[in-house]
Amino acid sequence: MFDTVRKHQQILQLVLMLFIVPSFVMFGISSYSEFLDKETDLVKINGKPITAQEVDSAAKRQAERVGGNVQIAQSLQFRQTILNELLQQRILGFAVDDLRLQVRKESLIKSLQNIPQIRALYKQDGSFDNMRFKQLLASNGLNEEQFYAGQAFDLKISQLVNSVARTEIANRKLSEIISTLYETERQVQVLSFDAKDYLSQVSPSPEDLQNFYNANTKLFESPEYVDVEYIVLKADPKEDAKVFSEKADQFANMTYDQSDSLKPAADKLKLSIQTQKGVTRSGASGVGKDHPLANPKVVKALFGDEAVKNKRNIEAVQTASGVIMSARVVTFYPAQTLPYKDVAAEVKRQVSQRMAEKLAVAAAAERFTALEKDPKSVAGFASPIWVSRNKPANLVGGALDKVMTLNPEKLPTVISVSNPGLGTMLYRVDQVRQPTSVDTKIHKAQAQQIQALAAQSEFAGFMAYWRDVAGVKVINPLKPMSSDSGS
């Protein structure tokens, strides 16, 4: 359990961050009152729709903020993320209005002073440059009233979210019980029945080998692969971000509009056309994880029908910040079943392994039956070790769960745990004890993790409640745009 807790202890904070979107990023608040045609409605909150146009506009603005391009803003995955964020904002906005939350003037002033763009408007003498402030707002399509209203609205949402995050469901007794369960130790002995120990007892016949090969040809295929050529556009640190954005749009448009060749875009932007042979669905071999041809979206596109069958350029993909690429398939090599003679050794290895595993499983079952009649027998078992959920030694997954959930009143007990592909393990458990000392740091950490999960659950319930109260209704699914790459 606490493996999961440790992995997710910061989920709540990450989730909350999605909801706090300062107005100064220029999303604005005018969209809260926009209404368009019903056929474009995606979701309704309290009868007010979020439309496809709103999502597209917000996606474009967000892509521009992070230095992205049109293709990214048009992708279904990116737009779905934007829709989810807009929906969360609207639900929280509804809750703020319904609860009639207010913001003190002092809190609003303090919030504004935390915005870098606002702090930059203060002169050396401490006075505020009101003219530059108005110009900044005007350049982003806002007046002072809209800006202050947006900031107050966001501050209300922030306060609401933080109040839920601070909700404590403190239960020290519960934490102590769970910590005790996780530090309780059990004495375990292990007896392994490994397939490798039975390999010397098997000897597959030529017929066994041929029959296995015929029935499992998929196991002996050479993977499909492609030889490709590609071009990469990288941002020049000396150039303005806007210049790169313009080049990226030009790059994306040319590789898409003139999809039968990379040369026009390469010539226009002075890029070299590079080549790579033997790219499989796992990517290009021998390249770093940051290489454009190691990008999953690029690889997926290279094996799509447009690239393989129609030999078109794949749509431009941003593989890293300030890096955009496109590629095309030069030659496609389909998967092929390798001849038996080329894989005979591997066929024999796999058949032998399977036959040995059957012997190991059968021997384990026989020994287990005997131990059920005489669980005190320790012949063949390894030396005993003490394990707990906090200190599992080499026990993992199902084996640890089975060992730690045995009824302590029925010890000694032997359990059998299958290890697919390898054999079977027998575990003999005969004692239970509490540790002589308690690690207060672990107890404290576990209590905090329990609290984090409780707060996360509390926030999920909070959002579910307001979703129902706001009458959220899905009208139409978000659809791919005509130029979406199908991501």
Image (cartoon, rainbow, N blue to C red):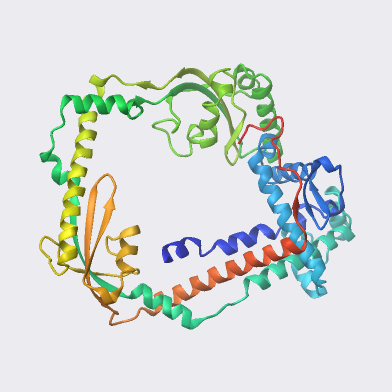
Residue drawn at the location 73% of the way across and 52% of the way down: 86
Residue drawn at the location 39% of the way across and 80% of the way down: 440
Q: Quadrant of the C terminus?
A: top right
Q: Position of residue 365 (x, y in %)?
A: 20, 53
Residue drawn at the location 49% of the way across and 22% of the way down: 228
Q: Which residue is more in the foreground, 284 or 97?
A: 97
Q: Position of residue 217 (x, y in %)?
A: 33, 26
Q: Which residue is more in the foreground, 131 or 6?
A: 6
In the image, residue 186 above or below residue 329: below
Q: Quadrant of the N terminus?
A: bottom left
**Quadrant housing residue 47:** bottom right
Left-right relation of 257 to 311: right
Q: Is residue 277 visible?
A: no
In the image, residue 397 above or below residue 334: below
Q: Position of residue 393 (x, y in %)?
A: 27, 64
Q: Position of residue 9 (x, y in %)?
A: 51, 65
**Quadrant housing residue 287:** top left
In the image, residue 100 above or below residue 322: below
- Count of residue discs: 0
Left-right relation of 4 to 454: left
Q: Is residue 350 visible?
A: yes
Residue drawn at the location 31% of the way across and 21% of the way down: 338
